[in-house]
């Protein structure tokens, strides 16, 4: 039942990711849309995010590998393609490996998702960013984008 629920959520999220990645928009616009969609997905699917967090932290290697492969493939593709497209367009430095950059961006966004769905991560987020951060999406998104832009933009 859990895997069926996860697979349904993955299919919904995959369609959203594909629509963002396949657009002709600038990299930062795509990244902003990805961040906004992650926040929205986390608010709507908080229970699944909590389950994902629990299952993947328990050491059930067979289940962890299956879930990671199912969930991460499309995210990996979306983030890598966005980075590669940005490099081709001259918006992103050439000396950054798209896979490593995608992994780091995904880690930022995964922690953001957990912050909207899991109590521990929510508390951490509030400690670092202030008590009202959960209601300041535009502020958070702007700062996250500035951080990522600083890492990716051509010097």
Image (spheres, rainbow, N blue to C red):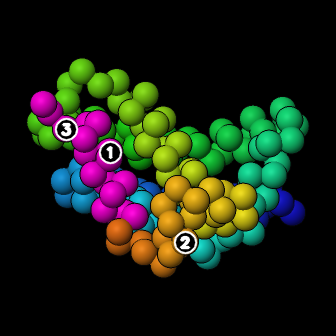
C-alpha separation, residue under disc 3 versus residue under disc 2: 31 Å
Return the disc, 2 or 1, that comes first in the chain's sequence: 2
Residue 91, numbered label = none
Q: Are marks 1 and 3 in contact (CB under 8 Å)?
A: no
User: Which quadrant does the C terminus fall into?
Assistant: top left
Relative horizontal placement of residue 34, taking residue 59 as reference (left or right): left
Q: Which residue is mark 2?
A: 131
- Image location of residue 123, percent across then percent down: 66, 62
Residue 81: in sight, yes or no?
A: yes
Residue at image location 79% in from the left, 58% down from the top: 51
Element type where label 2 sits in the image = helix
Q: Is residue 88 above or below residue 146?
A: above
Q: Nearer the viewer, residue 108 or 133?
A: 133
In magenta segment, residue 143:
yes
Return the disc, 3 or 2, that comes first in the chain's sequence: 2
In the image, the segment drawn in magenta is 140-155
- Image location of residue 1, percent across then percent down: 86, 63
Residue at image location 50% in from the left, 75% down from the top: 132
Q: Which residue is mark 1?
A: 148
Q: Which residue is mark 3?
A: 153
Return the disc, 1 or 3, that comes first in the chain's sequence: 1
């Amino acid at each position: 039942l859990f895997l069926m629920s996860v697979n349904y959520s993955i299919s919904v999220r995959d369609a959203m990711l594909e629509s963002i990645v396949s657009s002709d928009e600038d990299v930062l616009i795509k990244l902003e849309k990805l961040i906004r969609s992650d926040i929205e997905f986390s608010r709507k699917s908080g229970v699944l995010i909590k389950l994902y967090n629990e299952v993947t932290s328990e050491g059930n290697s067979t289940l962890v590998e299956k879930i990671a492969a199912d969930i991460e493939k499309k995210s990996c593709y979306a983030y890598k393609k966005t980075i590669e497209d940005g490099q081709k367009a001259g918006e992103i430095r050439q000396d950054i490996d798209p896979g490593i950059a995608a992994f780091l961006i995904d880690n930022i966004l995964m922690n953001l998702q957990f912050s909207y769905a899991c109590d521990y991560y929510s508390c951490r987020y509030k400690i670092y960013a202030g008590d009202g951060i959960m209601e300041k999406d535009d502020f958070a998104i702007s700062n996250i984008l500035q951080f990522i832009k600083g890492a990716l933009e051509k010097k």
